[in-house]
Image (tube, rainbow, N blue to C red):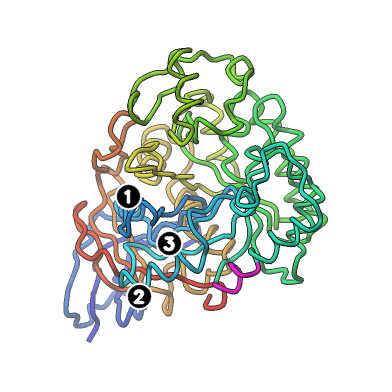
Amino acid sequence: MLDILIKNGSYPDYKEGVLKKANIGLEGGRIEYIGDDEPEASKVIDADGRVVAPGFIDIHMHEENFAEGKHYCIAEMMLKQGVTLAVGGNCGVMNQTVREFRDTIDELGGSPINYMMLSGYNHYWTALGLGHLDKSTPEQRKIIQEKMKEDLEAGAIGISFGIEYDPGITEEEIIEAANMNDDDDLLVAAHYRADGANSIAAIEEMADIQSKIGKRFQISHLSSCSAMGTMKESLDVINSYMEKDPRLNYDTYPYNAFSTYIGSTVFEPGCLEAWHKDYSDLLLQGDPYKNQPATKESFEDARENYPDMLVVAIVMNEDEIAEAIANLNGMVASDGIISNGNGHPRAAGTFPRVLGKYVREDKVVDLVTALRKITLEPAKRLDMEHRKGDIHVGADADITIFDPETIIDGPTFQDITLPNKGIDYVIVNGEIALKDNEIIDDRAGEFIAYQDK
């Protein structure tokens, strides 16, 4: 007997590029049946008029900070938007070591979603007391690499860099770290060196790094790099490089605003002039200025006295956001980051927004292509396509069931807790984790180590 039978729904067939109607049976955490029959099952879900999709995969987000308490916040936001697997440790940033993160998930008895992790270079750069513009010594680089090797042994799937955050990190240093072992299956991801007018040079640098290391290289959140007037040229450059080596790729998110800490180098003097924006285009997200547009005075005060405050910078062009999503290459990811419950709505609404706004409303991209960009493509990037990102017999039972006519994001810049609409069920490892926006099981997920892929 099956554990769950999902009947009358339609699932994406990526080989044919169409939705196909079928009944799907789940048992023991795996997909065990796809067909027209109705095998006996302990529970039956009628998905008539719904899409039965592989669980969404967020290849670029920022994981829990368990120093704020051993409980889940952003993982629950991920689950409520249909995500069943997320990758943390991006942009060179981690909130704890991979071992500490993995052990805490075990201690808590699981997670709302499945988690994978990258090891963040900047995390250890900062721990050594290096400043943003400092240059590391050979001895310091060796220390960082040894720490990252510990993360890899603990299950990290690769390494990440936040070049813009610590511009002292050189291209040679990145190449050296990426080549600290000879495992070509490791994933390398990087937050660019500069945005806007300097974005093309930043992309060229990352493409050059990829060509020299010969590993998969993920250009992080292309929208916040190039959606200030250079997106077309950026995509031309990336597509051209990918024709020669598809191990280069990128992710992007569906909002015309980015979010990061106000004390970072992103907000160095001259940033607003470079973006052709004003202080009022920055939304402060922490006390004493929570949800207030910045003024010169509050901006400077926050930079000096509240450097860990998140700020939303509404500085990108909507048409360029759509262009990055619609491009043949690329994946959709949230870049979600939450600090003390505050953050950008992308942490809670990215995937319903893509399927509601960009697929149904704006018709920027068709449904099956959009689903491929949030399921199969990131799964392939993670060497997990045999288990995740596709509906086939033997795949993990990570499933998101949604109504294509009503799915849309709910979270706003003022209130990220507003619910998404149109998601009926999220199933994680064969367990119903969410039904009608209510979390049913918040421990169905697990940490997936590189060694266990």
| Label 1 secondary element | helix
Q: Residue at x 64, y 64 (%)?
A: 147
Distance, label 3 to label 1, CA atoms, is: 12 Å
Tell me what residue is drawn at x 35 percent, y 40 percent: 356
Q: Which residue is mark 2?
A: 34
- Please give the range of residues in magenta: 149-154
First in residue order: circle 2 vs circle 1: 2
Residue 153, given in percent of the width and then of the height, sits at 60, 74
Give SS at disc 3.
strand
The residue under the point 74% across, 39% down is 237
Q: Residues within 10 Å of mark 2 (few under 14, many from 20)?
A: some
Pointer 3 with pointer 1, Cβ within 8 A: no
Where is residue 362? Give x, y as percent: 42, 32
The residue that disc 1 covers is: 77
**Labels 2 & 1 near each other (Cβ < 8 A):** no
Instruction: Residue at 24% x, 38% y: name it.
Output: 418
Secondary structure mostly seen in magenta is helix
Marks 3 and 2, Cα distance to the nearest angstrom?
Answer: 22 Å
Instruction: Check disc 2 and give the amino acid type.
Output: Ile
Front residue of 401/339: it is: 339
Q: Are marks 3 and 2 in contact (CB under 8 Å)?
A: no
Query: In the picture, residue 352 is in which quadrant?
Result: top left
